[in-house]
Image (cartoon, rainbow, N blue to C red):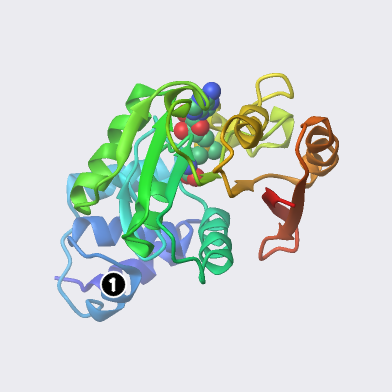
């Protein structure tokens, strides 16, 4: 019987498959946890299953690997995903880093909400990193929320999940922070075709009228205890943020920062 390593290399030579995606298929078939685990099993015997062959077929059709294997790694943890949720992106790991860095010296109790939680990656990662924080998470999609709950249950994390649009589930709650990666793409022509074909449009697309940034920022007015809001965004939104904040009756500062590709991707808003 051939080995994992030999089979992996023969597939890479004969097919135009992404090595990362291919390793994910092996990880699923061999019940491994990570890519480093995969390299530890290169000399094991390997017998591909029907699921493995079907995975190869789906990869050839450009289906995202995370939906094929039903999971995706985020901030050193594996999260369940399905086509009801956005596949977590590395930029969102950077959003988490930003929040952890900016709040590293804060010692007071915090109630922090993840609005538009999707698979729950922000809520679960914050709770793992900051166990003393009370974390809430909400989404408009019931199917997405059930995936987020499944992830929190698997990690044994206590998170207050609520179904609802925008800030509506939290209007009567005490909120000290919001960390959100809402839908923020204005032009669907800027999205890769396989993303548009497979990932939920509710998670990707918005317009200036329905954008979640607006009601979340208005929480600074209705919730005097709110200390910070951290968003994922795009450079397109920079001017919008600056002018919208001017319309609010309280002084707020916004600081933008770039992702690893030097693209403006994050907005940190706090009281002046
Ligand atoms: C870009 S995805 C982010 C998912 C996850 N937080 C992440 O970072 O991977 C945006 C999420 O917002 C949800 N959403 C869209 N419109 C919403 C609304 N009006 N109220 C609440 N959630 C909404 C979508 O269902 C989707 O799960």
Quickly name the residue at label 1: 38
Of residues 160 and 74, the one drawn nearer to the viewer in this rendering: 160
Does residue 105 sit above or below 17 in this rendering? Answer: below
Within 10 Å of the Cα at label 1, are there few (<14), some (14-19), or many (20+) other Cα atoms?
Answer: some
* Residue in the image at 51% along x and 27% along y: 167
Element at label 1: helix
- Residue 62 in view in this figure: no
Does residue 51 sit above or below 217 in this rendering? Answer: below
Where is residue 168 shown, x and y percent of the image?
Answer: 48, 22
**Horizontal arrangement in the rendering, residue 30 relative to residue 272 (left or right):** left
Of residues 45 and 19, the one drawn nearer to the viewer in this rendering: 19
Of residues 74 and 136, the one drawn nearer to the viewer in this rendering: 136
In which quadrant of the rendered view does residue 248 lie? Answer: top right
Where is residue 219 shown, x and y percent of the image?
Answer: 60, 33
* Residue in the image at 44% along x and 29% along y: 170
Where is residue 88 shown, x and y percent of the image?
Answer: 46, 48
Does residue 208 sit above or below 116 in this rendering? Answer: above
- Residue 175 in view in this figure: yes
Mark 1 Cβ inside 8 Å of ligand 1: no
**Horizontal arrangement in the rendering, residue 205 relative to residue 25 (left or right):** right
């Amino acid at each position: 019987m051939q080995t994992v390593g030999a089979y992996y290399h023969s597939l890479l030579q004969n097919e135009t498959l992404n090595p990362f995606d291919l390793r994910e298929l092996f990880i699923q078939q061999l019940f491994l946890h990570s890519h480093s685990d995969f390299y530890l099993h290169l000399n094991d015997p390997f017998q591909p299953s029907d699921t493995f062959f079907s995975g190869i077929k789906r990869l050839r059709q450009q289906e995202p690997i995370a939906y094929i294997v039903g999971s995706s790694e985020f901030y050193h943890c594996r999260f369940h995903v399905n086509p009801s949720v956005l596949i977590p992106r590395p930029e969102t790991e950077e959003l988490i880093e930003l929040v952890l860095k900016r709040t590293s010296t804060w010692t007071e109790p915090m109630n922090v909400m993840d609005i538009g939680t999707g698979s729950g990656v922000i809520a679960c990662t914050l709770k793992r990193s900051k166990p003393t924080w009370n974390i809430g998470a909400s989404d408009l999609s019931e199917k997405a929320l059930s995936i987020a709950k499944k992830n929190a249950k698997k990690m044994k994390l206590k998170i207050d999940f609520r179904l609802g649009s925008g800030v509506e589930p939290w209007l009567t709650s005490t909120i000290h922070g919001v960390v959100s990666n809402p839908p923020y793409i204005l032009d669907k022509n800027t999205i890769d075709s396989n993303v548009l074909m497979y990932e939920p449009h509710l998670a990707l697309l918005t317009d200036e009228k329905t954008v979640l940034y607006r009601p979340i920022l208005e929480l600074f007015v209705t919730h005097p205890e709110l200390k910070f809001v951290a968003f994922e965004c795009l450079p397109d939104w920079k001017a919008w943020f600056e002018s919208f904040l001017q319309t609010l009756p309280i002084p707020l500062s916004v600081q933008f920062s770039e992702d690893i590709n030097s693209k403006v991707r994050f907005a940190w808003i706090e009281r002046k």
